[in-house]
Amino acid sequence: MQLINIGFGNIISANRMIAIVSPESAPIKRIIQEAKEKALAIDATCGRRTRAVVIMDSGHIVLSALQPETLSGRVDKDLNIEEN
């Protein structure tokens, strides 16, 4: 199992991630609101602004204060280390 640090000591399983998206668009804001209503949203921002939304295969939505590019880079870096 590959784990990714999503900021402030919060770690998720990279194997369960479907997508990393920006929270700026209306459809993503709707997805976040619906997940909060269904208690499927996990807020890992530690009170900071949400900059990335991680969609998991379980239907959960993880909110992170890190940029999507940062999270993507961490996933790529860990995949390259695992392959070598």
Image (cartoon, rainbow, N blue to C red):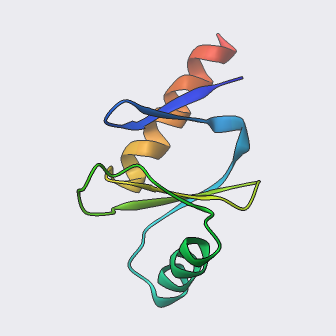
Q: On the image, which quarter does residue 60 sit in? A: bottom right
Who is closer to the viewer here, 40 or 81? 40
- The answer to whether residue 25 is left or right of residue 32 is left
Question: Residue pushed farthest bottom?
Answer: 26
Residue nearer the viewer, 76 or 12: 12
- Furthest residue to the right? 58
Task: Using the image as rendered, state which of residue 66 and residue 72 is in the foreground.
Answer: 66
| Residue name at image x 64 percent, y 10 percent | 84
State the image coordinates of residue 34 (x, y, percent, origin top left). 60, 80
Residue sticking out furthest to the left: 48
Q: In this view, does 47 lie to the left or right of 45?
A: left
Place of residue 42 in the rendered image (x, y in percent of width and height, measured from the top left): 51, 55
* Residue 9 sits in quarter: top left
Q: Residue at x 58, y 27 (%)?
A: 3
Whether residue 60 sits left or right of residue 52 in the image: it is right
Q: Report which quarter residue 36 is drawn in.
A: bottom right
Location of residue 27 in the rendering, given as x and y in whole percent from the top left corner: 55, 86
Query: For the N terminus, which image quadrant?
Result: top right
Total count of labels: 0
When the figure is inspected, residue 25 is found, relative to residue 41, above or below; the finding is below
Q: Which residue is drawn at 72% across and 37% down?
A: 15
